[in-house]
Amino acid sequence: YFIARDPAFRETVAAWEQAGVAARWPAAGDDAWVGTPGMNACVKAMADSLDVRWGVRAEQISRDGAGWNVHAGEECFSAATLLVAVPAEQAAVLLADVAPGFAALAASVASAPCWAVMASFAEPLAYASDTFRSDTASVSWAARNSAKPGRGGSEAWVIHASPARSRELIDLPKNEAANILLAEFFDATSIAPAAPTHLDAHRWLYALPQALMGEGARFDPALRLGIAGDWLHSPRVEGAWLSGRALAQAVAPMLAAQEV
């Protein structure tokens, strides 16, 4: 889920709600929201009118005269202005040769990892609440995903390991990490263990950055290069959106001047 507290972001979320791609989720808190029918629905709505290439990994950035090239495997994309909005650790690598100042800023940020487990069951688990939180257990957060607005189907839970536990398990194969964390979820919630009908895990390496609070975004008009991300504002969906908005506001005057 994500929260919406900043007035500008609240306006955007209200528009998402009206468009049917976001809904309140009271089980997680009064100001909690989820994308509908999935968490990526809001991103897809924003990208609907844009030329977005999903599943493409940027591997290298290089200068091309006054412009930029982004190398992605066998593909290469060119642009006059380049805005980099990826996790700090990845930004540090991409920018090292072309913008060492930005790269050093990104390299100063460390992110905590998170193992996320997805488990489905044939029958509902004997747990009254749709969410679980803990500051001390190896499982820090879990949610009955099938109870979120816009979801359906069989009983399904998303389970997040704590940062400390995620580091301990960071190099394990995902099936091994999934089984360990499912067992620890049952132990933390005192739920009688049940065999899942589906079990998977995702290792989220850069889940929680120690954000450079107040930075917002950076833009170099001489290079026509900018950086944004939650690591430049606050480690939340709202922080990422506000950072992106700050970068857009920095770039917009330059683009407007070119059109005059």
Image: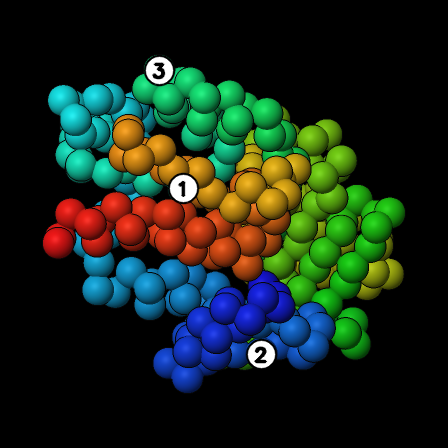
The image quarter containing residue 188 is bottom right
Please say whether residue 41 is visible from this viewpoint.
Answer: yes
Please report whichever mark, 2 or 1, sits nearer to the chain's N-terminal start: 2
Kind of residue sitting beneath label 3? Asp
Rendered location of residue 190, percent (x, y): 86, 61
The image quarter containing residue 127 is bottom right
**Mark 2 and mark 1: Cα distance apart in space:** 27 Å
The residue at 76%/35% (across/down) is 164
Q: Badge 3: how crowded within 10 Å, few (<14), some, or many (20+)?
A: some
- The residue that mark 1 highlights is 85
Please report whichever mark, 2 or 3, sits nearer to the chain's N-terminal start: 2
Which dot marks residue 229? Answer: none
202 in relation to 157, above or below: above
Kind of residue sitting beneath label 1? Ala
Rendered-image quadrant of the N terminus: bottom right
**Mark 2 and mark 3: Cα distance apart in space:** 43 Å
- The residue that mark 2 highlights is 24
Q: Badge 1: how crowded within 10 Å, few (<14), some, or many (20+)?
A: some
- The residue that mark 3 highlights is 97
